[in-house]
Amino acid sequence: MSPDGGEVAPLLREPANFKMRTNCDPHADNFDLRAHGPLFRIVGEASEQLGRDYVWQAFGYDVVRKILGDHENFTTRPRFTHAESGKHIESQFVGQISTYDPPEHTRLRKMLTPEFTVRRIRRMEPAIQRLIDDRLEMMAAAGPPADLQGQFADPIGAGVLCELLGIPRDDRREFVRRLRRNVDLGRRLKARAADSAAFNRYLNNLITRQRKDPGEGLLGMLVRDHGDNITDEELKGLCMALVLGGVESVAGMIGFGVVALLDNPGQIPLLFEGREKADLLVTELVRYLSPVQGPNPRLAVKDVVVGGQLIKAGDYVLCSILMANRDDALTPNPNIVDANRTPVPDVGFGHGIHYCVGAALARAMLRISYQALWRRFPELRLAVPIGEVKYRNAFVDCPDQVPVTW
């Protein structure tokens, strides 16, 4: 029996394909799983990787929001054990703010926040617009058909990150090449390890240069304002966190969002009904698509009751952002795109202390990208049936190619 006298959460076998997509929608296996309730236990690949007999899977909006917002009872620190003090951070996770708890998380977050204020983002918008316009001109010159993901979405995601970090312009092509190879999970493990080592060497050299001569980007700002309070390893970890959490998710949302809008063309005019309506459309697309299906696993550091279920200290919980955002408890008719719906507090950018620090910048990039794309190519359409759009094996859900014409 559960603490409230109800049935204990079922123990289910993890379906092989439940993390796959069916076009823009969750795989049907997810809806079958949700029939068992908002919070249940699963065995399979996830439990094996985390070294547990089972893990909890949270699908319901209310329980996901509860767990993500509770840093007193749950930690994101990898491989936390009761024998540890909770203060030790393994070397590969130093600077990875998504794996930090307070007070270390609070210290690093305060350093980053000034770079993501509305004022700072507004200053970046002209550079973002120039980057987008340049890519669109290159697409137009090459002519249709085009791969919108490879020719537009990927370069925009990576290019804005270079602008944000302050990567020297002469380095950007090589930086992006190494970045792409580093996040490609389809490559063999040995090749990925070599790519990761090369990328780490570049970041070490970049940080050394920034220490000597701070630039105008985020790295330069951190060195100038917090140089004595942040280590080189933390700077490198923050770079990696922005790469993993920013580049693929934004690039994926650009390509994914275009696919969703072409599948729901009645929403496209809302991009041009004023900034507020365009921002609402972007927010709705993030809710609907949720390219980051799940954040870092949460580990219970003490016994806690969530949704009437006892989660014991040492249990892992996986939160499905995608299924929480497709929950009737959040909004009516969650499986359709409707930017005219009453705004809702979705969890597309997370919730709680680990809410995405770059959410406002990501929304601005998406709005500018969609608007510029349809201004330049008002007759834009898919060059293949939507079911033939392929998705890549990456850290977040992202189209591999989006063939379009105009």
Image (cartoon, grey):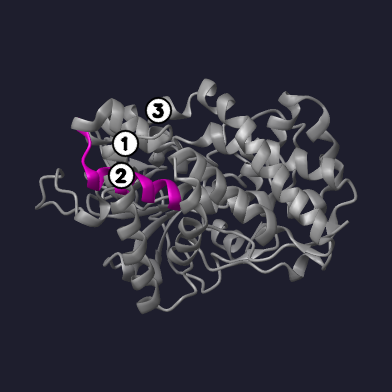
Q: Is residue 7 above or below residue 184?
A: above
- Of 21 and 359, the residue lying toward us: 359
In the displayed structure, 80 sits above or below 118; it is below
Where residue 330 sits, quadrant-wise, is: top right
Query: Local crowd at mark 1 within 10 Å, few (<14), some, or many (≥20)?
Result: few
Residue stretch in magenta: 229-244
Name the kind of residue labelled 3 in the image. Thr
Q: Mark 3 points at which residue?
A: 113
Q: Is residue 273 magenta?
A: no
Where does label 1 land, which residue?
A: 213
- Residue extending furthest toward the top: 119
Tell me the SS state at disc 1. loop
Q: Residue, x 47% and y 67% (percent of image)? A: 181
* Residue 359 spot, x, y in % from top left: 52, 35
Amino acid bearing label 2: Arg
Magenta span dominant secondary structure? helix
Q: Where is residue 26 in the image (x, y as percent from the top left)?
A: 63, 59
Q: Distance between the residues labelled 1 and 2?
A: 6 Å
Q: Residues within 10 Å of mark 3 (few under 14, many from 20)?
A: few
Figure disc tally: 3
- Answer few, some or many: residues within 10 Å of disc 2's Cα (few below 14, many 20 plus, some between 14 and 19): few
For image coordinates 80% across by 61% down, the residue present is 142
Q: Distance between the residues labelled 2 and 3?
A: 23 Å
